[in-house]
Amino acid sequence: MEKASDFLVIGSGIAGLSFALSVASRGTVRLITKRDKRESNTKYAQGGIASVFSKDDSFEEHINDTIAAGAGLCHEDVVEFVVKEGPECVKELIRWGVEFSFDDKNHIALGREGGHSRRRIVHVKDVTGSIVEDALIQQVDAHQNIKVYENHIAVDLITLKKLLKADTRADRCLGAYALDTDTGEVHSFLAKKTLLATGGAGKAYLYTSNPDVATGDGIAMAYRAGAYIANMEFFQFHPTCLYHPKAKSFLISEALRGEGGVLRLINGEPFMERYHRMKSLAPRDVTARAIDSEMKKNGDEHVYLDMTGIRPAFLKERFPNIHGVCMRYGIDMAAEPIPVVPAAHYMCGGIVVDDYGETSIKSLFVCGESAFTGLHGANRLASNSLLEALVFASRISNKASGDILHEKVRRYDIPLWDVGSAVNSDEAIVVSHNWDEIRRLMWNYVGIVRSNKRLIRAKKRIQNLQDEIKEYYWDFLITSDLVELRNIATVAEIIVESAIMRKESRGLHYNIDYPAADDAHFMKDTLIKV
Ligand code: SIN
């Protein structure tokens, strides 16, 4: 079935929802999301939104911290406008109903995280993302111009080039095919403007802080459609996820270190002073690598984050979620150190967009973790991601909705999704096996520390898996699992390819065969295109 609107939004995290709200007064919006509308990376963001609200802080310092974390690759013009436009976007969130934490002087409360020289993280205790998500969904649900389709996974973009099967110079996005996972039908969603806000791809790795939905769908779809993808070698590993046999993907926010938490070895020795002048508050790339190196050197399965020097009542009040979850696993963080390990957390690369979020394919916009704007460089500064999503959602809404009502878009006959001779698969085990193999090989060969040999090995394995998936994909009727497997394999292949191209170590990309940064050759982004 065909469904048309002015705007199509794919994804229901902060990027998709805030964009939908910004454009809804100017046109009709259809928003598709592959599971429950609350399920997104945003919901699990604990830290908050980095923005200049204190009189002790300045735009200049936030800009400098972002650039320092980015290890020479941030696009400085983008850093400048994102930092400067940040406070207004945070105020818009407040107007949409988000109640941020306040301090006892009735000022907006500001936390601190790794790499920040000042307190500047606007937050709601340790559940910022979840509260933001709830507030935005409430607004979206109440808006008569926005229709939300849950359990709809986008399968592929519909572009002029694919439709006409011709090499049109100026390609254009016309919408997307999406599978309704309740009925098994594939619908075409057509729109004047399409926004990809599909989030990250942490599920490419065995251990991740991301929820199951983070399968890089937008990256894979845009890549197949011919958009440029950049800097995918820079995958950020969060230094501190809870280490417990029963805890899956639970983040221990960097805000704990901002309040005085100390990283220690199993024997109790603090070790971060050997790696960075900011000690336990060093930027993430340095901290994750230091933990990885200490664990390997000592044969330990985790390190500790020690919060026992902080007042118990404060810990409970400031971090109710983390405190509660740790307690459920039998860890009283006020009395004993928390066992932690690094895990895949955030994709700093993404689909290349301009300063208003548009890709090289006209009318296709990208916002949030799937976008490559140039803000993060080789390593994202903590809590700059929700900020980027908000600022770009606002910029995109201005560009995309400018003349939408008067825009005449030529109508094309969009073919229905062709199932060909595909039949129902009776081999679901193949999907889960391939999925597992990708995640393991990415963790073992393309993780925090890489080498030429491991990258080449990963490349060969992924190519074999890709061949198998392709065959399987066209023989069997698509399911959500199969769509996600196909996407994660593509994202993994792009990460490996990008990592092979960068023959140096910088920020989040560390290759033991090229242990130093090579400014003469690699002060540039890694670009990939089909
Ligand atoms: C955290 O709370 O540590 C995560 C914040 C972020 O990834 O920016």
Image: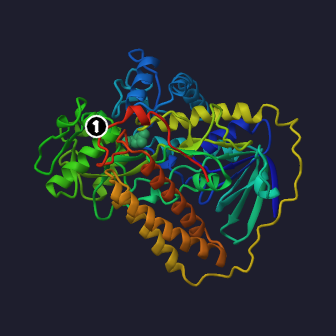
Q: Residue at x 36, y 42 (%)?
A: 504
Q: Residue at x 67, y 38 (%)?
A: 358
Q: Position of residue 3 (x, y in %)?
A: 81, 57
The residue beneath circle 1 is: 257
Of the four image quadrants, the one with ligand 1 is top left
Left/right placement of residue 237 relative to residue 396 reads left
How crowded is the residue under tag 1: few (<14 C-alpha within 10 Å), some, or many (20+)?
many
Q: Amino acid at mark 1?
A: Arg
The answer as to whether callout 1 falls within 8 Å of ligand 1 is no
Q: Quadrant of the C terminus?
A: bottom right
Q: Nearer the viewer, residue 385 or 431?
A: 431
Q: Nearer the viewer, residue 421 or 498?
A: 498
Answer yes or no: is residue 476 visible.
Answer: no
Q: Quadrant of the N terminus?
A: bottom right
Q: Residue at x 14, y 51 (%)?
A: 266
Q: Nearer the viewer, residue 463 or 389?
A: 463
Q: Position of residue 310 (x, y in %)?
A: 22, 36
